[in-house]
Amino acid sequence: MSETEIEALVDPARWASAFPNEVIVALDLATQLCHDSHDLGDELVERLRQHWTDAQIAEILMVAGQANMNNRVGSAARQIFPARRSS
């Protein structure tokens, strides 16, 4: 990944200048999974199908979902098990 792409990741408004459409729709899916995944919307599903096969979409879902779960568990764990300082 280039420095430009890494820097663009933090701001969805910059995605179009750094990524092709198929990557943008995958990022949109990953973002939606972090919020309300109960209704992805027909538009997002159609965009996914324009660029990716069902198997590829399933893989994107699994990778993005796993990363999302890891982040949520890590955030909760840091609250429950704060770093302990040695005396």
Image (cartoon, helix red, strand yellow):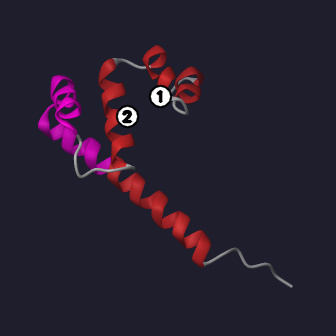
Residue projecting furthest to the right: 87
Q: Which mark is residue 12?
A: 1
Name the residue rendered at 53%, 29% in the picture.
Answer: 11
Name the residue rendered at 55%, 72% in the picture.
Answer: 77
User: Quick check: 50 above or below 56?
Assistant: above
Identify which residue, 83 or 16, lies in the foreground.
16
Residue projecting furthest to the bottom: 87
Residue projecting furthest to the left: 54
Residue 47 percent coordinates (x, y):
21, 26
**Which one is in front in this view, the residue at disc 2 or the one at disc 1?**
1
Q: Is residue 61 magenta?
A: yes
Q: Does the magenta stretch include residue 43?
A: yes
The quarter of the displayed image where residue 83 is located: bottom right
Identify which residue, 58 or 76, lies in the foreground.
76
Local packing at callout 1 (Cα closer than 10 Å; few below 14, some 14-19, many 20+) is few
Assign a secondary structure to mark 2.
Answer: helix
List the residue tagged with mark 2. 27
Is residue 9 rendered to the left or right of residue 35? right
Is residue 85 rendered to the left or right of residue 63? right
Q: What segment is highlighted magenta in the picture?
A: 41-63
Residue 22 percent coordinates (x, y):
29, 23
Is residue 73 rendered to the left or right of residue 58? right
Assign a secondary structure to mark 1.
Answer: helix
Q: Which is nearer the N-term, disc 2 or disc 1? A: 1
Q: Main secondary structure of the magenta part?
A: helix
What amino acid type is highlighted by mark number 2? Leu
Residue 32 percent coordinates (x, y):
34, 43
Name the residue rendered at 36%, 55% in the picture.
Answer: 66
Q: Do the residues labelled 2 and 1 touch (CB within 8 Å)?
A: yes
Local packing at callout 2 (Cα closer than 10 Å; few below 14, some 14-19, many 20+) is some
The quarter of the displayed image where residue 43 is located: top left
